[in-house]
Image: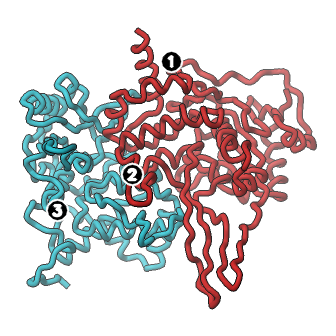
Chain colours: A cyan, B red
Amino acid sequence: MTFIEDQIRQTARKYLENDEVSCVIGYERDTRGRSRPVFIESVDQVDRLVWGPDCNLNLASYLHERKHSPGKDQPIPKTAVVLRPCDTRAINLLINEQQVARENVRIIGVTCEGSEINGSLRVDCEFCQERVPPLYDDLILTELPVEVPESADPYADINEMDQWTPEERLAFWTSEFDRCIRCYACRQACPGCYCFECVAEKLDPHWVSIALEVPEKMFFHVMRAYHLAGRCVGCGACEAVCPMDIPLGKLNRKVAKEILELFDYRTGDSIETHPPLVCFNPNERLNL
Amino acid sequence: MKVISQEQLNLWLADLLKQTVVVAPIEKHGKIQYQEINSISQIVWDFTRPELPPRNWVIPMTEPILFIEQGPTTVLKQPDLPHEKILFGLRPCDSRSFKVLDALFWDKEPADPQYARHRQALTLIGLACPEMWDSCFCTVVGGAPDDTEGLDILLTRIDDGFAVQAITEKGQALVSGLDLLQWSGVPADPSEARGLPKLHESAEWAAVFKDVFWKELSHACLSCRVCSFVCPTCRCYDVRDEVIAICPNGKVYERLRAWDTCTSMGYRRIAGGHNPRETQVKRLKNRFYCKFMYYPEDFGVLGCVGCGRCIDACPAGIDILEVVEKVDLKLAQAQI
C-alpha cells in the first residue's frame, strides 16, 4: 500500500462508515495487475482501492449513471469519486450544466503526478501546471512535493500541426480514423458526452449512416470534438480507452487551444462559468 | 508428418497470391491485423493474435446486401459475388470462430445468402500458436492452440520449417502439388495447464441468472461496443436502407448491413421507445448468456472461442474469464 493509497482508503472508509455516501468510485487492480474502476459500497471492501499512473480514466463519467433517483420517493444517491485535477474540472462542468448536484458528490482529489497511457506519460501531463485539484472535499497528498514542469508552451504539438497544409492534415486524420472501429468507447468514457441519444446513432432523423467507414468515422470524431469545444477538460480518458490507439487528445487539444485563444476560456475553472459555445453573452468580444 | 521449409512455403504463397486474394497478418499502424496483402514480405510470422478478428471476411463491418432502384418498376440487385480468398495465418481460435458463425448463418436452412457467398469463397489456412498468451483461454471452451477446427490446412512451426496438416479435401487439393518432406518428429504441445476455470454446461447457467454479482460486475461497464467489435463470434448487425443517388425516376437505395451489438444502449430499443434492456446489467449479462447459454442451446456450439481479445480491450477491465470463474464459484456454493 502506498502513501496515496493509504489516504484514499482512509477517506473512503470515513465516508462509508458515516453513511455519507452509498458508494466510493475508485480504482482497483484486476487479477492480471491492471487498473480498473471499482465501486466500493461497504467498509470491508475499501482495501481494494489502489492508485497509480495507469489509473487513467475519468471516473466522473460514472456519475451520469447515478444522477437520477433510482425509484419513486428514493433520493438521488450520494457518491464519492477519486479524481485527478483535470477530472475534477469535469465536475465543475457537470454542475454548471445541471447534471450533477454538488451536495451529491464527494470529491477525493488526488495531487497528481501525471497519468500514463500504455506506459507513456500523456502529452497534457508533460506541461500540466495544475497538480492540485481546483475542486475537492478531501485532498490526497503525495509523499514528496510534485515537481511542476517548467512553464512551456502546452500546445507546441498543435502549433506544429497548424503549420501543415489542409491536405496534410486531412491525410493525417484520415489515416488515424481509418482504423477507428466506431466502438464509441471514447464517447462512453467521456464525462462531457452524456446525450441520451447521440447524433451518430440517432435514427430519426438519420443524420449519419450506420456504415463503419472513414467518412462516418471522421464525421463522428469531428462532431464530437465540436460538441466538446470549451467542454473538454483534457483528462485523456477518450485516448486511454481507445482500442485502436487513435490520438484523440490531439484533436481535443486543438479545439481547446482555439477556445482559449478566442474566448480566453478554460473548461471547468468554476461552476459559474458557462462554456462559451453553449451560452449567449451580448457583451462577448472575440479576441479575433 | 509432412513438412515444408519456410523458403518453399514463401514460394507457394507467392504463387497463390498470383492466382487469388490472400489475407494474412501484417503490421498496420503498429498493430497486427488481418489484411489483404500485395506481397509475401508483408506477412508477419511472429505475433500473438491480430487486433481484430477475421469475421470481417464473412460479415464485413459495412456491406451493401441489396441495391434498390426506384422507377416505373423497382429493380433489385444483389452485390457482385465476392472474390475467392485465402485467409492465411489464422490463429486456431479465429478459425474455430468460423464454425461458430456457420452454425447460425450457414449450416441451418435458410442460410444467410450474403454470408454463404462470402463463406464459400474462403479457404482457411491456420498457423498454430507456439504458446498460450496471457489472456488466452481456448482450452476452457474446447479449443487448443493447435486446434484444427474450421481449418482447411494447419501449419505448425517446427525447427526448420512448418509441419503441414491438410484437414479438408479442399486443403488436400491445395497442398497436393507441393513437394513436402517427411518428418518423423512431433510438434511440441503448446497447451498449458495453468489453473484456468471450469466452464459450466449451458443449462447450469440459468441458476445464477438472478445473482447479485452481475450487478456488481456491470457497474464499471461503459456500454461501449469494444468487447463485441473485437470478438470473432459476436455477429449482430444493423440494417438500414440508405439513399445513395437521386435519379429522375426516383431514388437508388442500398440496403446496408453494419456491425452492431447488444452491449450498446440503443440496440434493443423498439418502436415506441421501449427498451427491454435499458440497464447496463441487462445488456452485459446478455452478452455472456448469449455466449455460454443461448447460442449453445439454439445452435449447438459455444459462442466463445477463448481468444481473450475482449479481456485485453475492455476499457473497464471486465474479464470474461473472471465471469466464468464466478459462475463456477456460485454454482459450487449453491451445491453446499
- Judging by the rendered image, the residue that carries numbered circle 3 is A97
Q: Residue tagged by mark 1?
A: B195
Give the quarter of the figure containing the N terminus of chain A: top left
Protein chain holding label 2: B
Decide if residue A71 is in sight here. Answer: yes
Which sits in the foreground, B229 or A233?
A: B229
Return the residue found at the far bottom.
B248
First of labels 1, 2 by sequence position = 1
What chain is tagged by disc 1? B
User: Which residue bears the numbered disc 2?
Assistant: B275
Instruction: Tell me the crowding category of disc 2: few under 14, some 14 to 19, or many 20 or more residues within 10 angstroms, Cα based.
Output: some
Rendered view: B34 above or below B205: below
Q: Which amino acid, mark 1?
A: Gly
**A231 above or below B310?**
below
The reply to whether the C-beta atoms of the residues labelled 1 and 2 are less than 8 Å apart is: no
x then y, percent, for residue B8: 84, 43
Please determine if labels 1 and 3 lie on a single subunit: no
